[in-house]
Amino acid sequence: MKKHLLLLSLLAAVSPVGLSQLQAAAPSAPRVIEIAGNDQMQYTVTAMTAAAGESLKVVFTNVGTLPKEAMGHNWILLKAGTDVMAFATDSMMAKDTDYIAPKHKDKVIAFVGVQGPKKSGEVTFTAPAAGVYHYVCSFPGHFMIMKGTLTVK
């Protein structure tokens, strides 16, 4: 009798209903957002929206042709309330850490390091709580033009 109950339990677990419940519980793939930066210091996407807790994958590509040393680009999503000007100003000299000043590292939600021409990088993260979050390129002199917002609802 115990073997029979065990067999029925196993069959129920792998039945179509059981499998659909497992599939529903499995996390979905992140939503992919493609962003490019160019030699004119512009992001192709300057406003994004997401739901709180949504899984996002940002694929960032430098579509420019100028050398990385002259026109590298990164993508940095900052925590709400971060002083963007202070972050970017302090980060301009932090070449060894992809232009993220060590004293501001705790203000970063997600980032793609500096990319040279025709290079891409990506980052997957969970959208934070509802609010407006800024993203910037912190390569020296770029943040005033290369910026955008992620609005989380």
Image (spheres, rainbow, N blue to C red):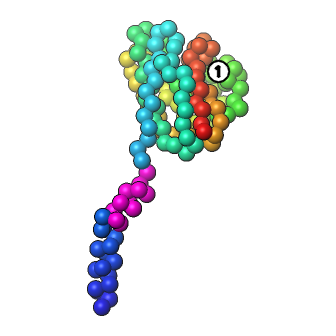
- Judge left or right: residue 2 versus residue 101: left
Q: Main secondary structure of the magenta part?
A: helix
Residue at 34% across, 65% down: 17
Residue at 42% across, 47% down: 28
Among the 4 quarters of the image, the one containing residue 148: top right
Task: Tell whether position 20 is magenta.
Answer: yes
Note whether 9 is above or below 110 in the view shown.
below
Count how many numbered circles sit on residues in the image: 1
- Judge left or right: residue 89 versus residue 119: right
Q: Residues within 10 Å of mark 1 (few under 14, many from 20)?
A: many
Q: Position of residue 20 (x, y in %)?
A: 35, 60
Task: Tell whether position 126 is magenta.
Answer: no
Asked whether 56 or 108 is in front, the reply is 56
Residue at 62% across, 14% down: 144
Q: Quadrant of the N terminus?
A: bottom left
Q: Which residue is mark 1?
A: 88
Asked whether 69 or 106 is in front, the reply is 106
Q: Position of residue 47 (x, y in %)?
A: 55, 25
Q: Amino acid at mark 1?
A: Ala
Q: Is residue 82 visible?
A: yes
Q: Which residues are magenta?
A: 17-27
Among the 4 quarters of the image, the one containing residue 65: top left
Asked whether 119 or 4 is in front, the reply is 4
Note whether 66 is above or below 80 in the view shown.
above
Q: Is residue 140 visible?
A: no
Q: Quadrant of the C terminus?
A: top right
Q: Position of residue 53 (x, y in %)?
A: 55, 45
